[in-house]
Each structure stands twice: as C-alpha cells, then as structure tokens.
Image (spheres, rainbow, N blue to C red):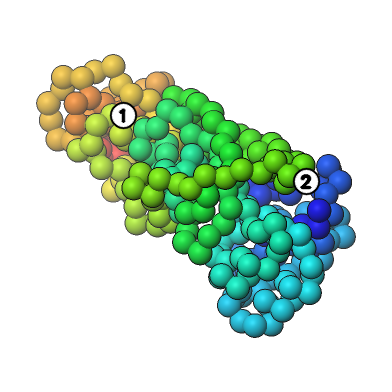
C-alpha cells in the first residue's frame, strides 16, 4: 500500500518507524511547519520531519489543509491510504475523500472517551485506571469516526503522562501495524462510536498548573502526575512559584489548619496540608534552578511551617 503519513510530535515516531521497518511504501510525510523555539528562537524541525528526512521521505509542511493547491498535491501523490498520528490539524472533507482506502487515525485513548488534544494528560488527571489506543476511520468531526480496533493498558498508580505517553506510542505502533495488515488482507471492519458516551480532552494551558490545596490528596497527586512533564504543576513556596514534578500522599489525614500550609520538612520531602490529608512534595524545581529532589532542595534552605523561608 502507498501511504501518506501525517504526524508531528514524538508520539508519532514509533508508529512511523514501525510501518517503515515493515516495508510499507511511505510516499510522503505531512507535518507541522518548522517553528522558532526557546530563548534563542532557533528554528527546529518536528520529530516526525527529522525521521522522514533521515529515511529520504518527501516532507510537506502546509500551514493549512484548506486551500486547493494542497488538495491537488495530495491527490497527485496517489496514495492508497492516509495515516494520521498526532498531526495537529483536522482533515477537511475533500481530503478525507481522496484515498481509496480512506484516512485512518491512531488516537491515544479508548474512544469515545477523551477525544481531543490531550487525552493522556486528562486520563491521568481524572484518575482513570485504564486507557489505551484506538484505530479509527477519520471523519470531519474531531475523533468521531468509526472504530476499527482498540488496544488497552492499565495506568500505574504512580505513572506520569511522560511515562504513559511512551508506552502508548509503542502500543499505537502495534495497533497501526495490525490495522494496515487488515487493510491489505481485506479484513477491515469498523463500528460507529457511541457519541452519547463521548468525553473531551481539551488542550492544556499554563494557567491550569497551580495546585489547589483545598482539593483532596489523590486529586492533587493525579494532577501532578498528569502535568508531568508539561506544563508541570506549580505552587508557591516562600512566595516564589515552583514547578512540582512528583508527590506522595501523606499518612496524616486528620490535621486541621490552613490548606496549603507546610506542616513538616525533612528527608522525606515537604509536607503540605490539603483537604482530607496531606501531600508530600518529592521532586521540584525552583526558578532559575534545576529539577531536584525535595531533600536536595532543603539542603540550601529551610521552610517554616507557615511556608516562609528561614534564612
């Protein structure tokens, strides 16, 4: 089969590498335009573009898929199927209708749950214990096409978005490989989604990162796990906002006091009062500093129980 692959971030790498290694004919890769990043505003390629160029695959980076020239370009490529994995753009109807086998998508959730841009983050933040990847036929509506197949996996109690992302990328590669094999064999069957059961995973914004200390320990831990490694949960210590990468639920559950106040510091971390218990900060990053354990952080300063820094 002649394949156009559309993808952008690291999540798409394992699926792309898998179908390339299996000998599928990837005639073109579409990915997001190059962007200037970091303080130096150095232009960088997407992870998918870097891999495509390594293998000599033609790369296209349109800013929009809605103009006629892009439609005509895709039509002239004469692909049998379009594969989409975390591309970052919706495909308009006139492009969906081009390939004879249609357009398929690998999505990082068990659809119809968590349609949208951040399914891994939201599954963890919402305390899900199971997730997976879905292959589906694409439609005009976001992540609403007919389901081809699923692969499920459990979410570890301490697993972060970063960890789960890597596992689901490999699981997605497995599913894509099997789905393409079914297409070649003529064994594809798909079923409509139950749209009434759909939930959504909208993009994450940095203003979502502050920890709400009036929340419960488990909800706070889920948030920290879900926002690791981007955009990262935050809280103020000694009046300065810190990034919080890892926490544990404290054993204390019946302490009264102001939520968000520090009740203990030491080798185990920084223990903070929240609703119905405490949270122990295990790993954090101060502005202008590196990511470190709480024990390392506390070697350079002490924090009073009211959160103020002791010189």
Tell me how many marks there are: 2
Give the answer, above or below, for where 224 lies relative to 11.
above
Which residue is at 42% across, 39% downward?
Answer: 123
Give the answer, above or below, for where 72 lies relative to 301.
below
Q: Which residue is mark 1?
A: 218
The quarter in which the C terminus is drawn is top left
Give the answer, above or below, for where 62 lies relative to 140.
below
Which residue is at 72% across, 71% downward?
Answer: 74
**Mark 2 vs 1, N-terminal side:** 2
Q: Which residue is mark 2?
A: 184
**Which residue is situated farthest in the bottom direction here?**
68
Callout 1 crowding tier (Cα within 10 Å): few <14, some 14–19, many ≥20: some
* Label 1: which secondary element: helix
In the rendered image, residue 111, in percent from the top left (x then y), is placed at 47, 43
> In this orientation, does residue 265 appear?
no
Quarter occupied by residue 67: bottom right
In the rendered image, residue 58, in percent from the top left (x then y), is placed at 82, 66
Asked whether the beta carbons under mark 2 and mark 1 sit within 8 Å of each other, the answer is no
Callout 2 crowding tier (Cα within 10 Å): few <14, some 14–19, many ≥20: few
């Amino acid at each position: 089969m002649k394949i156009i692959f559309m993808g952008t971030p690291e999540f798409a790498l394992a699926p792309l590498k898998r179908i390339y290694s299996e000998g599928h004919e990837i005639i073109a890769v579409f990915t997001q335009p190059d962007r200037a990043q970091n303080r130096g505003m150095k232009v960088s390629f997407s992870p998918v573009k870097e891999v495509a160029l390594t293998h000599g695959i033609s790369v296209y980076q349109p800013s929009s898929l809605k103009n006629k020239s892009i439609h005509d370009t895709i039509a002239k490529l004469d692909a049998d199927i379009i594969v989409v994995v975390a591309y970052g753009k919706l495909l308009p109807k006139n492009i969906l209708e081009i390939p004879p086998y249609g357009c398929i998508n690998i999505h990082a959730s068990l659809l119809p749950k968590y349609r949208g841009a951040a399914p891994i983050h939201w599954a963890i933040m919402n305390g899900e214990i199971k997730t997976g990847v879905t292959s589906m036929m694409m439609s005009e509506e976001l992540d609403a096409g007919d389901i081809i197949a699923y692969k499920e996996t459990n979410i570890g109690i301490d697993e972060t978005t970063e960890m789960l992302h890597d596992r689901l990328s490999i699981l997605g590669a497995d599913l894509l490989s099997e789905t393409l094999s079914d297409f070649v064999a003529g064994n594809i069957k798909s079923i409509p989604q139950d749209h009434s059961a759909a939930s959504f995973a909208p993009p994450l914004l940095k203003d979502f990162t502050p920890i709400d200390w009036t929340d419960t320990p488990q909800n706070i831990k889920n948030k920290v796990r879900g926002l690791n490694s981007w955009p990262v949960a935050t809280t103020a210590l000694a009046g300065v906002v810190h990034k919080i990468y890892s926490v544990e639920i404290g054993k204390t559950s019946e302490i009264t006091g102001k939520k968000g106040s520090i009740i203990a510091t030491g080798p185990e971390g920084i223990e903070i009062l929240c609703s119905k218990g405490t949270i122990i900060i295990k790993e954090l990053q101060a502005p202008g500093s590196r990511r470190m354990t709480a024990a390392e952080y506390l070697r350079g300063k002490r924090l009073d129980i009211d959160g103020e820094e002791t010189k």
